[in-house]
Image (cartoon, helix red, strand yellow):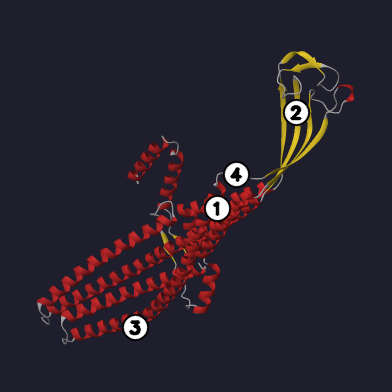
Amino acid sequence: MRLWSRVAYGVAITLGCAGGGRVVAAQLDQARQAAGSPPVGLTLDQAIAAALANDPAYAAASASTGSARLDAAISRAALLPSASAHGEYLYTQPNGVRNQAGQIGSQAAPRFIANNAIREYASQLLVNETVSVAGLEDYRRARALASQSSADLESARRDLVVRVVAAYFGVLDASDKADIARRAMDEAQSFDDLTRRLESGREVAHADVVKADLALQQRQRDNQDAALALDKARLDLGVLLFPDPRAPYTLAAPAESPLPARSEVEAAASAGNPDLRSALAAFHAAHAEVLAARAAYLPSIGFNYTYGIDAPQLAVNGPDRVRNLGYSASASIDLPVWDWFSTHNRVRQSQLREKATQAALTTTQRQLIAQLDEFYQEARVADDQVASLRTSVDTARESLRLTRLRYSAGEALALEVVDAESSLAQAEAALADGILRSHVARANLQTLTGVL
């Protein structure tokens, strides 16, 4: 604990120089407190939720999705009229003569002919609107990109779910293998004790004791390796879930469920696959980009409405009751004439990108069909093999029992008992790997169809 305190203090001081020391120190303190807390019970859904809250790649994808939605909102706002308030005071040096350009009588003339008076005040409300096909297509493109980003976010979520599921059941698999190694070591210890008792009664040779000792030593090493593999698996999952990966936790194995029918899986995959939705949205965005580029050949129309004051006095009424407050309105049209084929080249660029997205869409469709068939067959074969592996474990356990009985009766060799113990350990380990393979295959299938 003292060493941990020194390490936490050193890291906090080092990062504090960069402006983040207090935050890191608080996180380290929370991690230290979590290390001494009781184990946290987790289900698979809770583990997925914790990983979604901590994973930086998913956070980046979520930020990109939010930014794309805001871009769509900005594009939509560009289609609507905009209003702004304008205030200005303008002073121009007089030229020494007077003229009749003012509202009433003669007054000092400004030196700049573009200005109306030597003092000019403006306080106006401006409303502008521009109507163009390009703006409408840009909005459609922004909406398509927002849909693509949303689909990419779902793809990132499902990729993370697959990682969490693999790590989750990897911990359960490593735990099962640790239990198997411990049972195998206990069995080897029991057989070693048996050979020593039989040797003391001069019923077996010392070679049987040597063989049992060698088997016990191997089982002890296997037990250590299994415990180490369990620690590594727990840390790998802890990195995904907790600020401190060493935080203690327990996992609950989910209930087994039957494999759904092939038709149900195909319907769910075609309706909810995010990769397909992302590719389709990318194609729609590219098509909208082509239309927006072509719209540059068309004219754009602008409208302006101004209401307020633009006069030599900052007042509603000027001298002799002259009304300063008023409005003006204008309409304009811009028609493209010649741009040295720039619009033509932009259209060609967008068409090339559209062809690329169309090729990506067809490839995604083919990959979806292949992955659906692959994942379903993998899940079906894994389920069938789990049942077969359970039978093998029962057979190996019965074989060990009978071999031990035969050895106790002097009808079997020590080598046969050791081989039977090895066969049982291998069968149980194979069953644990088969269960892991089944769960991962089901997770891949469920993420493909949108269940997880």
**4 or 3: tag closer to the N-terminus:** 4
**Nearer to the camera, 414 or 174:** 174
Secondary structure beneath dot 3 equals: helix
**Nearer to the camera, 352 or 58:** 352
> In the image, residue 434 lies at what x, y percent?
36, 74
Q: Nearer the viewer, mark 1 or mark 3?
A: 1
* Inter-mark Cα distance, 1 to 3: 66 Å
**Residue located beneath label 3 in the image:** 391
**1 or 3: tag closer to the N-terminus:** 1
**Residue located beneath label 1 in the image:** 347
Badge 2: residue crowd in 10 Å (few <14, some 14–19, many ≥20):
some
**Nearer to the camera, 299 or 314:** 299
Q: Nearer the viewer, mark 2 or mark 1?
A: 1
Badge 1: residue crowd in 10 Å (few <14, some 14–19, many ≥20):
some
Q: Of the residues shown, which amino acid type is indicated by label 1?
A: Val
Secondary structure beneath dot 4 equals: loop
Badge 3: residue crowd in 10 Å (few <14, some 14–19, many ≥20):
some
Q: Nearer the viewer, mark 4 or mark 3?
A: 4
**Residue located beneath label 2 in the image:** 122
| Picture mark count | 4
Pointer 2 and pointer 4: residues touching (CB < 8 Å)?
no
> In the image, residue 180 lies at what x, y percent?
30, 71
**Residue located beneath label 4 in the image:** 338
Secondary structure beneath dot 2 equals: strand
* Inter-mark Cα distance, 2 to 4: 37 Å
**2 or 1: tag closer to the N-terminus:** 2
